[in-house]
Amino acid sequence: MKSVKTHVIVSTVLCALTLAVTLAARGALPEQVPMQWGLTGEASSFWPRDAVVFGVPAACVAINLLVSARLASKGENRIAMFYITPVVALFATAAIVFLGTR
């Protein structure tokens, strides 16, 4: 069984992959990336492109480290719990890129 430290490192690296996704899509993203949509389907909130490209991955890594620290301090035995944040981060990043380039 791998140590908790290994799972924290692997899950953080997976979260850091969101940077590769946003950097790859940087050229296709508009200057102002839509981040929130109203009930009518119109974008109602925008972020600057560089905030999305660099800020979203930084936030994903920070959230993962906080969650992992909390799980480790509680002695979590369910290893899958360490990988929920990276999976959500990758799906959310893919959705941001997809919707931002439409």
Image (cartoon, grey):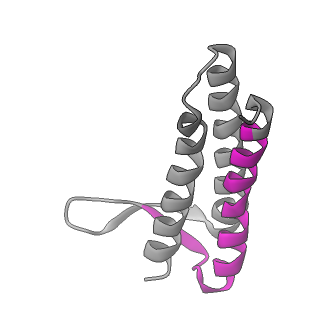
Name the residue located 68 percent from the left edge and 15 percent from the top edge: 73
Q: Percent x, y for residue 54? A: 73, 60
Q: Percent x, y for residue 46? A: 50, 62
Chief secondary structure of the magenta span? helix
Quarter of the image where one finds residue 93: bottom right
From the viewer's perspective, is residue 97 above or below residue 17?
below
Q: Where is the N terminus found, in terms of image quarters?
A: top right
Q: Where is the C terminus found, in terms of image quarters?
A: bottom left
From the viewer's perspective, is residue 1 above or below residue 97?
above
Q: Which residues are magenta?
A: 7-35
In the image shown, does 27 or 72 lie closer to the viewer? 72
From the viewer's perspective, is residue 51 above or below residue 69?
below
Name the residue located 27 percent from the left edge and 59 percent from the top edge: 38
In the image shown, does 55 or 62 lie closer to the viewer? 62
In the image shown, does 30 or 61 lie closer to the viewer? 61
Q: Percent x, y for residue 58? A: 72, 50
Name the residue located 52 percent from the left edge and 43 percent from the top edge: 84
Query: Is residue 49 magenta-colored?
Result: no
Query: Is residue 17 magenta-colored?
Result: yes
Number of numbered discs on residues: 0
In the image shown, does 59 or 4 lie closer to the viewer? 4
